Image (cartoon, rainbow, N blue to C red):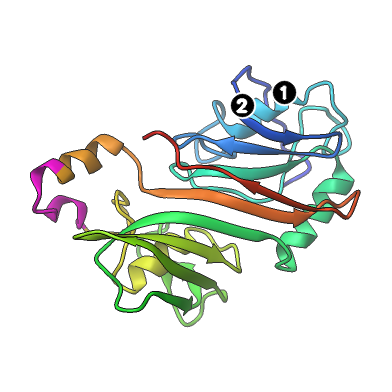
Amino acid sequence: MRDDVRFEPENIALDIVFEDDSLAVINKPAGMIVHPGAGVSGGTLANAIAWHFRSEPPASAGGSDRIGIVHRLDKDTSGLIVVAKNIEMQEALSAAFRDREVEKRYVALVHGSPRENSGAIDRPIARDRWHRTKMTVAANGRSALTLWKIRERFEKFTLLDVEIKTGRTHQIRVHLASINHPVVGDSIYNEGRDNSIANNEVRKAVEHLGRFFLHSAHLAFDHPKTGERMHFTSELPQE
């Protein structure tokens, strides 16, 4: 996070799972952008945090409306995200993510049925040279490792538990699409698979969902101040 970026505080309700004087764990709803950018200046998680923490110690020196977002979730990914309340916590949590000391587990509904019950996807990811808003598996990309195992099989879909060991942009979505099991509802990476669902009722249900089926369900890390191992879980949202 750039130190010269400031966020206009906005009174947006937050589902706070845990909070102390150092950090907070928030259950982010689908549809909320984490960080302003690309023409979006308001309505984000950053704006909401700036309001909620406005009387707290700043995450960066120079202003109480600067907040320590140390990792991100895609707009339509729901679930757990941790936020630092001061610069020391921001640096410590950022280091923990960088050193792969944070457990990040997700639930994803994908098209098709994998042959195996579990697997690992170890493929580098880079920005797509033709579509700059997309990512792709590419030999010249940054290393990325995703582990998955089956939670439940359905007729045309499979519910997966997914753990990522790295934090590349769109990692889970890109990796699962690369093994021909894209995330349901992901119009960017599933190449129209949603539209080809034969069962009309199921196809309409996916359309009604209005998001892709990916949820940050589990987060675990050592508290930078106390050293205690913290574990947080979030059930699938109602939709």
Q: Which one is closest to the eye, mark 2 or mark 1?
A: 2
- Measuring from the top left, give residue 228's x and y in whole percent: 85, 53
- Measuring from the top left, give residue 50's x and y in whole percent: 71, 27
Residue 133 appears in the rendering: no
Mark 1 or mark 2, which is nearer the start of the sequence? Answer: 2
- In the picture, measured across the screen, residue 237 lies left or right of residue 59, that is left
- In the picture, measured across the screen, residue 232 lies left or right of residue 175, that is right
- Measuring from the top left, give residue 227's x and y in whole percent: 88, 55
- Measuring from the top left, give residue 18's x and y in whole percent: 72, 36
Q: Which residue is mark 1?
A: 52
Q: Which residue is mark 2?
A: 14
Hey, which residue is sitting farthest top in the picture? Answer: 11
Q: Amino acid at mark 1?
A: His
Per the rendered image, the range of residues in magenta is: 192-201
- Residue 28 lies, with reference to residue 129, above or below; the image says above
In which quadrant of the rendered view does residue 64 lie? top right
Q: Nearer the viewer, residue 58 or 17?
A: 17
- Residue 21 lies, with reference to residue 119, above or below; the image says above
Q: Is residue 196 magenta?
A: yes
Marks 2 and 1, Cα distance to the nearest angstrom?
8 Å
The residue lying at 52 percent from left, 75 percent from top is 141
- In the picture, measured across the screen, residue 32 lies left or right of residue 100, that is left
Q: How many numbered marks are there?
A: 2
- Residue 221 lies, with reference to residue 11, above or below; the image says below
Q: Amino acid at mark 2?
A: Leu
